[in-house]
Image (cartoon, rainbow, N blue to C red):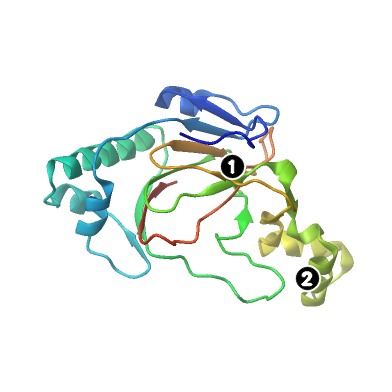
């Protein structure tokens, strides 16, 4: 089950893929969740994949070729089905086994990697889809509980020191280097864990969006490898 006690009505839960992709974002709703209880042994899939580096993209051919138990086969069929659903919708899903992401420590006063709360941006209308099948799951944060890092005075002053240009170009600088996509959780905030097996659709910052983009982050991989589908 998903704990929605702190969701502030931003999440709309649905029971099928068609509703997942067709339910409109409106008002404060900027996340839609197809709630599922999946069968199968996804940990076996992770164990059988040949890993390469911190992040291994699982190709469909390799997934089909794995020798799996009955429970592992159930997990594989779900993965293949989800891949096909998203492709038929026009998305480009990627299935990854993640050991960890690279952290960005370029600037000690602001983190801009995926472990930082952030939003996605696109020049064209689109959504972010993701599902964690195994391992630590992503989190989202109600927008009212998040503050843009570039609006925090101490961080903003440090960013101004990095910028070498006319004052009127500062905001463009923040956007160009994606500083403006990152958020800090306010004191007393309550991140929402996205759980296992649920397929999520999150609002993206794009020119035609009618809602605030969904603030989210990747988890620290404390329990080992993570199996994630994202697009």
Judge the density around disc 2: few (<14), some (14-19), many (≥20) Cα neighbours within 10 Å: some
- Look at 62% across and 53% down and name the residue there: 118
Which of the two labelled residues, at mark 1 and mark 2, occupies the earlier sequence position? 1
- Look at 40% across and 32% down and name the residue there: 89
Q: SS for tag 2? A: helix
Judge the density around disc 1: few (<14), some (14-19), many (≥20) Cα neighbours within 10 Å: few
Query: Does residue 66 appear left or right of residue 10 in this picture?
Result: left
Residue closer to the observer: 122 or 202: 202
Disc 1 vs disc 2: Cβ atoms closer than 8 Å? no
Image quadrant assignment for residue 162? bottom right
From what the image shows, is residue 215 above or below residue 19?
below
Query: Does residue 45 appear left or right of residue 229 in this picture?
Result: left
Residue closer to the observer: 72 or 83: 72
**Residue farthest to the right, as pictured:** 167
What mark, if any, has residue 159 been given in the picture?
Answer: 2
Q: SS for tag 1? A: loop
From what the image shows, is residue 28 above or below residue 191?
above
Residue 186, percent from left and from top: 74, 52
From what the image shows, is residue 169 above or below residue 118?
below
Q: Point out the image quarter for the N terminus.
A: top left
Image quadrant assignment for residue 166? bottom right
Residue closer to the observer: 134 or 174: 134
Query: Does residue 26 appear left or right of residue 161 in this picture?
Result: left
Residue 229, percent from left and from top: 38, 47
- Look at 69% across and 39% down and name the residue there: 212
What mark, if any, has residue 137 been given in the picture?
Answer: none
Please state which of the two labelled residues, at mark 1 or mark 2, is closer to the viewer: 2
Q: CA distance from mark 1 to mark 2?
A: 28 Å
Residue 198, percent from left and from top: 42, 36
What mark, if any, has residue 124 been given in the picture?
Answer: 1
Query: Does residue 220 appear left or right of residue 58 in this picture?
Result: right
């Amino acid at each position: 089950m998903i704990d929605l006690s702190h969701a502030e009505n931003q999440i709309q839960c649905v029971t099928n893929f068609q509703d997942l992709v067709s339910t409109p974002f409106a008002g404060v709703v900027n996340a839609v969740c197809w709630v599922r209880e999946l069968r199968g042994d996804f940990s076996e899939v992770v164990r059988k994949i040949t890993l390469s580096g911190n992040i291994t993209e699982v190709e469909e051919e390799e997934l089909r070729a794995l020798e799996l138990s009955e429970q592992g086969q159930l997990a594989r069929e779900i993965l293949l089905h989800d891949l096909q659903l998203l492709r038929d919708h026009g998305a480009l899903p990627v299935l990854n086994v993640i050991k960890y992401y690279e952290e960005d420590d370029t600037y000690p006063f602001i983190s801009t990697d995926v472990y930082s709360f952030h939003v996605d941006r696109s020049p064209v209308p689109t959504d972010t889809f993701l599902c964690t099948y195994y391992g630590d799951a992503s989190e989202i944060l109600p927008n009212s509980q998040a503050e843009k890092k570039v609006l925090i005075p101490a961080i903003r002053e440090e960013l101004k020191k990095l910028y070498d240009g006319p004052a009127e170009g500062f905001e463009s600088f923040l956007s160009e280097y994606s500083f403006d996509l990152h958020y800090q959780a306010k004191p007393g905030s309550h991140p929402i864990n996205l759980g296992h097996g649920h397929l999520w659709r999150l609002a993206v910052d794009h020119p035609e969006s009618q809602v605030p983009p969904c603030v989210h982050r990747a988890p620290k991989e404390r329990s080992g490898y993570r199996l994630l589908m994202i697009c």
